[in-house]
Image: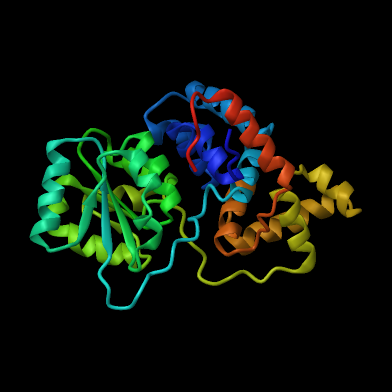
Amino acid sequence: MQVMDGQSAAAWRLTPREMMIVFLLGAGRTTPEIATLLGSRPRTVENRKRHIYDKLGVGSEGQAVAMAVRLGLIQPARLRSAGEPGRAALVVLMGPVSADRDEVAQVLVRERIPFVTVMQRDGLIRDDWVTSHQGSLVVVLVDPTDEDWLVANPLRAPIVEIRSHDVSERLAVVGAMARKAGGLVATADAGACLLPAVAATAQGMLVVSRRYATALMTWAPAPSAAVPQLTARERDVLDAIARGQTIRQAARSLGIATKTVENIQTILFRKLGARNRRDALTIADGWGLIEKALPKAYHTGIAMRIGEASQGPIAT
């Protein structure tokens, strides 16, 4: 069995819908709000949350978001370097064989964008050109399956997702953001938008089709204007939240009164523009205010549990 790091292990362990729920919890959404966004029932969301707690080894929403933050499951991962200046990005085209994928390939040919089409996922993992390529890579996923995401993520390249109309706009946006895609383009817009989407995504920008932009702006959390300046005690409380501690546990570990922790937490939320603890964690993580280091034993423990639960070899 091959042991993965904590992020890869957790990503393998959580289902796509569970990843969406973790992402929405990190955005401060309540269970009824998540149910509405995902088109499901609150009871179904609660059941999935219990599965998430079990898989991450936690016992509450706050602890689940804290663990997701520390494992790097919410904020975008570090991407590979942009490559040599002036060298065009190489597109790695993936997704199930379909007329839509063929149409995207024709657009790439017409726009003279260099690309390779992945026919076998295992071959992509083994091929040396992925790591030896000197230019930047951009992955284009056309109606991707879970396996396509698992293969694409370790490339550490920007991802543009091309979606057909098989899911709602809101669900497509939630899924793309939970998977850390840099672009979300409707199939109907691929002919006109693919070239600028690839170029912008390669530079670290977020690109979405107009039909998805409205859904994104409806619920996406608004970022703060500047990095919040926290006092030493506010950082202590934030660190306690990131460790999944309750207010009482934080007070005990910091040697201060519970009421004092509550007051500091209120000020912390105001500075971060957060609605609750989960929202505060995501915003603070976006500003790089949270230490993500986890004990090596924890990573190994997750990987061991996944290795026992999964069938066949695990690809990293």
Residue at image x 27%, y 36%?
168
Q: Position of residue 184 (x, y in %)?
A: 29, 51
Residue at image x 70%, y 60%?
267
Q: Position of residue 84 (x, y in %)?
A: 35, 75
Report the colour scheme: rainbow
The residue at the far right in this view is 255
Residue 198 vs residue 179: left or right?
left
The part of the image, by quadrant, that contains residue 89 is: bottom left
The part of the image, by quadrant, that contains residue 132 is: bottom left
Q: Nearer the viewer, residue 46 or 94?
A: 94
Q: Position of residue 101 (x, y in %)?
A: 17, 42
The part of the image, by quadrant, that contains residue 193 is: bottom left
Residue at image x 24%, y 60%?
197
Residue 210 vs residue 309: left or right?
left
The number of callouts visible is: 0
Q: Quadrant of the N terminus?
A: top right
Visible residue check, residue 189: yes
- Above or below residue 201? Residue 50 is above
Q: Nearer the viewer, residue 53 or 146?
A: 146
Visible residue check, residue 50: no
Residue 253 vs residue 186: left or right?
right
Residue 214 vs residue 15: left or right?
left
- Above or below residue 86? Residue 146 is above
- Above or below residue 296? Residue 233 is below
Q: Position of residue 128 (x, y in %)?
A: 38, 54
Residue at image x 57%, y 31%?
52
Q: Nearer the viewer, residue 114 or 78?
A: 114
